[in-house]
Amino acid sequence: MESLSEVKSSAVIQEVLANHPDAKPEDLITLLQEVQDRCGYLSRDAILSVGRHLDMPSSKIYGVATFYNQFRFRPLGRGHIQICRGTACHVKGSKKVLDALAAALDVSPNTATQDGVFSYETLACIGACGLAPVINIDGNFHANLTSQAIPGVLKQYQKQGK
Ligand code: FES
């Protein structure tokens, strides 16, 4: 049986496809981007639906989507953490912050934790070099971080009921 979020996401996928009634195979990337923007990732249902819409086999859709690292195939956590690995942050110890974060969450990048609360990714520069080393959780910057501060930052976010 489908969960409520699967039903909702299926409706969103159909809405995106309905907005592109005459889409052609060359519109594949645009469709995948729109579906991911709306659903957060590309589910199996999304791949199959886009394939049917464009009359393309799902293996071909997967092949194209996996070629581009902008596409995700699993949902992100409710709190998605961007950790900066740009030069200014690196010089100020962002590798240790990243290691502490990865150990605390115990998942690969762009994968939600078991409880669905967090996921994380590394970026080259998040445009706040003066705050280095810095992470961004849902638009909130946490500046001058140390590895020791990570558990507190995560707890603070959880306390807010996310
Ligand atoms: S290098 Fe980290 S914000 Fe720019």
Image (spheres, grey):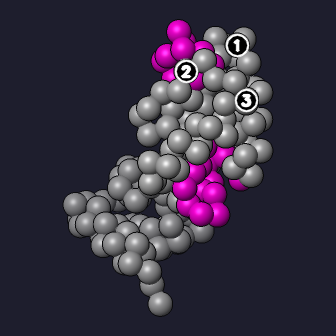
Task: Report, in whole angstroms, how far the alpha carbon at label 1 lies from the one at label 3.
Answer: 11 Å
| Residue located 41% across and 34% down the image | 139
In the drawing, does residue 103 fall left or right of residue 12? right
Q: Nearer the viewer, residue 148 or 121?
A: 148
Pinpoint residue 102: horizontal percent, then vertical percent.
Answer: 73, 43
Task: Report, in whole angstroms, how far the alpha carbon at label 2 lies from the one at label 1.
Answer: 11 Å
Neighbor class of circle 2 (other Cα within 10 Å; few <14, some 14-19, many 20+) is some
Q: Nearer the viewer, residue 82 or 31?
A: 82
Task: Find numbered disc 1 in the image and state the secondary structure of the residue it sits on.
Answer: loop
Pinpoint residue 20: horizontal percent, then vertical percent.
Answer: 25, 60
Question: Which mark, residue 29?
Answer: none
Q: In the displayed orientation, state which residue is furthest to the bottom.
A: 1
Mark 1 vs ligand 1: CB below 8 Å: no
| Residue located 53% across and 27% down the image | 142
Mark 3 lies on residue: 147
Question: Which mark, residue 92?
Answer: 1
**Disc 1 marks which amino acid?**
Lys
Front: mark 2 or 1: 2
Pinpoint residue 106: horizontal percent, then vertical percent.
Answer: 74, 52
| Residue located 62% across and 38% down the image | 152
In the drawing, does residue 70 fall left or right of residue 150? left
Task: Find numbered disc 2 in the image and state the secondary structure of the residue it sits on.
Answer: loop
Mark 2 lies on residue: 143
Pinpoint residue 149: horizontal percent, then vertical percent.
Answer: 66, 30
